[in-house]
Image: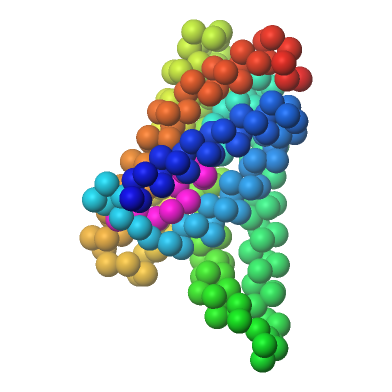
Amino acid sequence: MNALFWFIMLIINFAAIMLAYRLFGKTGLFLWIPISVIIANIQVVKTVEIFGFVATLGNIVYATSFLVTDILNENYGKKEAGKAVGMGFFALISMTVLMNLALRFVPHESDFAQESLLTIFSIMPRIAAGSLTAYALSQFHDVWAYNRLKEMRPGRKYIWLRNNASTMVSQAIDSIVFTLIAFAGVFEFALLIEIMLTTYFFKWLVAAADTPFIYLARSWKDKGIVE
């Protein structure tokens, strides 16, 4: 059942990105970055079994942020892609500060949410630290690598190459750095390595599956369907 939900979530994420782009143009892509970063850092506290492997949630929605920065890089240039990465930083830091401040409020006797919020957000600073570090290294590498490959192999013919090559290396960086910072000492070593490998594997699947969508985004831009 988890595998089915994984594919459904994958489809919904891709559909949401393309709909946002079609409706709002470049602004829609910028909008998706904070959405993906915030949702991913909430979902990642939940571990599940998918295809017989233990993995954290949040892999799909986070991996789609690479699709968004690649579309921005392809259609609008390196500067716009870098701007989107900065927006993700701002969103994650803001969420971490505001939610941890919310936990400091003394709940009323009628409150029923405090314990659940503590479970999710009390480890958020550590997850945020891991996420910010991994996000910085992987996303800026992705923007740089995509733009470099675009300069070396321009044109529509090589979109698949720059999309997959830049993203798959960047996601390896992200998976290793984030897992070590966020979960070292939380899980046993063997499980930590399994989560690291499965996290990268599922992100790799998303990267491979998103290639048609970057071609579609480029086609919309070339035809003037989006600005």
Residue under the point 48% across and 12% down: 158
Count of picture labels: 0
Front residue (pair 209, 199): 209
Is residue 60 left or right of 109 when viewed as pictured?
left
Which residue is at a point 54% across and 9% down the rendered structure image? 156
Q: Quadrant of residue 73?
A: top right
Q: Residue at x 61, y 34 (%)?
A: 17
Asked if residue 143 shows in the view, the reply is no
Residue found 57% across the figure and 53% down from its top: 39
- Horizontal side of residue 49 vs 58, given as left or right: left
Residue 56 position, x and y percent, is: 40, 55
User: Which region shows up in magenta?
Assistant: 54-63
The reply to whether the magenta stretch includes residue 58 is yes
Residue 1 appears left or right of 162: left
Decide: is 6 above or below 21: below
- As for residue 118 lying within the magenta part, the answer is no
Quarter in which the C terminus is drawn = top right
* Residue 168 seen in this snapshot: yes
134 or 227, which is in the foreground?
227
Vertical comparison of 138 with 126: above or below: above
Residue 170's x, y, as percent?
46, 37
Instruction: Indicate the quadrant where residue 19 lies.
Output: top right
Q: Quadrant of residue 216?
A: top right
In the picture, measured across the screen, residue 226 lies left or right of residue 216, that is right
Q: Position of residue 182 (x, y in %)?
A: 44, 62
Residue 214 is situated, as x and y percent measured from the top left of the image, at 55, 22
152, above or below 165, in the image: above
Q: Nearer the viewer, residue 17 or 170?
A: 17
146 above or below 218? below
Q: How is the image coloured?
A: rainbow
Furthest residue in direction bottom, as rendered: 109
